[in-house]
Amino acid sequence: MNAPAGMVAPMDAPSTLLREISRWSRRYAWHDRPGDLLVGVSGGVDSVVLLHALVRAGLRPHVLHVHHGLRSAADDEEALVRRLCRSLDLEVKVVRAPTAPPTGRQAWARAIRHAAFAECAQRHALSFVLVAHHADDQLETQILHLERGTGLAGLAGMPASRPLSADGAGPKLVRPLLDVPRSMVLDTAREWGLEWAEDASNQDLSYRRNAIRSELAAMTPEDLTAFRDAGLRVASRVRRLRRAVCRGLDSGRALPDADLAPWPRAVQELIVLEWLALAAPGLPRRSALARRILRLGDGQPGRRVRLGEVEIWRERGSWTLRPTAPAA
């Protein structure tokens, strides 16, 4: 467990964080129904600060803690969350995950959490599910996506709000701290004298996100702030570009030259990847694949690329995606 560090935080850290909560509350009228929220609390500093901020803002959220059973400290984390909720006079639901698979545990844990969010929100007829991702998490996510080769959605990072379910029904997932840097979250925790759990797995640099976090921590505060702010600006601009691309695509099946011609080659690759995400979600979203498709435009109409269950055809004025014919 990590107790308060005894440092004096800047006075504007808690007030800035509370202003973010108030901004979201005004947007969705949370104060008109202060119990219409579900917040995921792991016991880490981010979610502990989020929960305290919601309560200090006059809201009364439901609390969900998922016990993944992946670490020896999982029982201690559950106990901490239960103590925290008792001190705030809040009810907490604890979900114990089944046995984890031998590989892909991070994706598995995320799926378990989201399923638990959906079930709990539905049971209590709640409209909003809140999680504590902050601006540094957003920057790490953008870097991960860049390393893997990403489309516009990856560069845009995590949305501040979106439907929790893929079909758009049910509660909305909201990240109210997404514009708040990690340093401000920590300063607020110390200012308020909070207790939180330190996840030892965050020190495991075999996880690429942890390695990126370590590299960012080595930057000067000024450089990190500039880098983070640049990432936020990129995310905002790319989201606007992505909306324009989605409006311009012909139901996700045909990609007209007119949608590509105004952009440099690097942006064309991102638009192609976005088109593939809409038209054929099962295809890998890799820059090499986008370049391969764009090279069709250098030859005569009628050229094609076969990709698993679909084919990309180069026709006059557009690229077209079609299901492949069954093999003879």
Image (cartoon, helix red, strand yellow):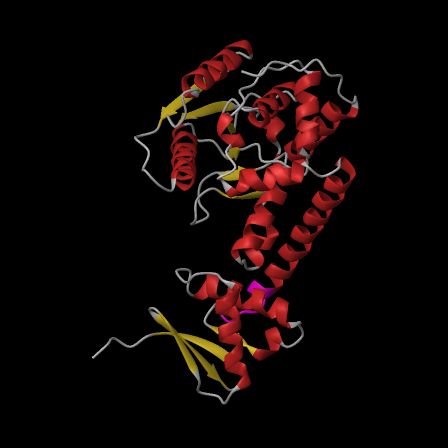
Query: Which residue sits at x=56%, y=26%?
Result: 47
Is residue 153 highlighted in magenta?
Answer: no
Residue 135 visible, this orientation = no
Is residue 246 highlighted in magenta?
Answer: yes
- In this view, 308 is above or below 232: below
Query: Which residue sits at x=49%, y=62%?
Result: 286
Residue 147 lies in what quarter of the image? Answer: bottom right
Image coords of residue 199 (percent x, y): 51, 25
Image coords of residue 186 (percent x, y): 66, 25
- The C terminus - image quarter: bottom left
Q: Does 296 sit left or right of 242 as displayed?
A: left
Residue 311 visible, this orientation = yes
Of 138 and 167, the residue lying toward us: 138
Q: Which residues are magenta?
A: 245-250
- In this view, 292 is above or below 194: below
Query: Which residue sits at x=44%, y=87%?
Result: 302
